Amino acid sequence: MRLGNGSVRLGGAIFGIIVAVGVLAPVLATTDPSAIDPTARNRKPGAEHMVRGEDGRPRAVRHWMGTDTLGRDVYSRVVYGARVSLVVGVTVALVSAAAGLVIGLIAGYVRALDGVVMRVMDGLMAIPAILLAIGLVSLSRAGLRSVILAIVIPEVPRVVRLVRSLVLSIREEPYVEAAVALGARTPALLRRHVVPNTLAPLVVQATFVCASAILLEAILSFLGVGIPPETPTWGNIMAEGRALFRVFPHNILFPGIFLAATVLAVNMLGDGLRDRLDPRVGRRL
């Protein structure tokens, strides 16, 4: 249990810092993340640059992570990019968990629909998630909503398979059979006995979906098929800096560190929650 608790604490702490960075982006950012300044192109991390403030007076701005080829401050763009990644990750996790729970309950409890539903899910899972997401995004206008939808669809089948397997096991338990013998109706049976026993594994799965969604959004943006380039996202920042990576690696290094730290933190949080919520894993530890 110590390992699980440690993973929850460390992963939760790192993820909490990333969330704080995203929420406080207007306060933490030193400049407008979309402001273009040709006189400050490709500055190295730590360089200072004189800009004219709102009062008309010149002031020095330090670029903690350097600037890109358009003179935009990489630090400010990385800070604002945390917002997009968190919105995508959390939204995809919540929507996928909700949709997967409903479809999984239907597939696992209604035997007549099990075969049809699962064949559809198997068909979606047969296509690599990134290829399916690219295909779905290409069918609509690039934007935050289309990216979220394109990531949700490949993630839902994984949640459905988990919920279905849990329901198939739970419905054979003696307390469920006793409730059926006493005349409990299906909605009440699902609400009182089946759904509560699926929530713990579902929460753990949702954390892994969140990490996967954050990574997929960055890949889509890096490939140029995700969120529009003018929006500061970690994938967009790395995509814009790859041409000059050998000369100015900071354009990819810093957003890559934030992306890796966020995905690692969410995965550690999921591992720790699994160790704490699954008594079988806890006994093995």
Image: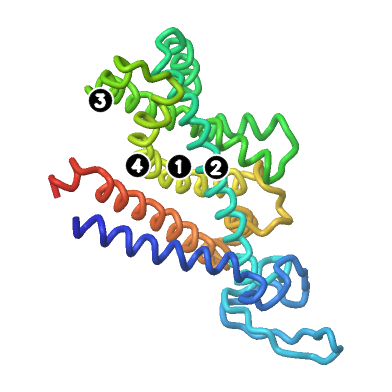
Residue at x 75% of width, y 37% of height: 141
Q: What residue would you read off at disc 2?
A: 92
Identify the element where label 3 is drawn: helix
The residue mark sitting in front, 4 or 3, is 3
Q: What residue would you read off at disc 3?
A: 175
Residue 105 appears left or right of 242: left
* Badge 2 or badge 4: first in the primary sequence: 2
Q: Are marks 2 and 1 in contact (CB under 8 Å)?
A: yes
Relative vertical location of residue 256 with respect to residue 159 in this rendering, above or below: below
* Badge 1 or badge 4: first in the primary sequence: 4
The Cα–Cα distance between marks 4 and 3, rounded to whole angstroms, is: 19 Å
* Badge 1 or badge 3: first in the primary sequence: 3
Residue at x 34% of width, y 39% of height: 201
Q: What residue would you read off at disc 4?
A: 200
Residue at x 34% of width, y 42% of height: 200
Q: Residue 209 has which mark? A: 1
The Cα–Cα distance between marks 2 and 1, rounded to whole angstroms, is: 7 Å
Amino acid identity at mark 2: Val
* Badge 4 or badge 3: first in the primary sequence: 3
One can see residue 60 in this view: yes
The Cα–Cα distance between marks 1 and 4, rounded to whole angstroms, is: 14 Å
Callout 2: 10 Å neighbours few (<14), some, many (20+)? many
Residue at x 58% of width, y 34% of height: 133
Residue 90 appears left or right of 182: right
Q: Are marks 2 and 4 in contact (CB under 8 Å)?
A: no
Amino acid identity at mark 3: Tyr
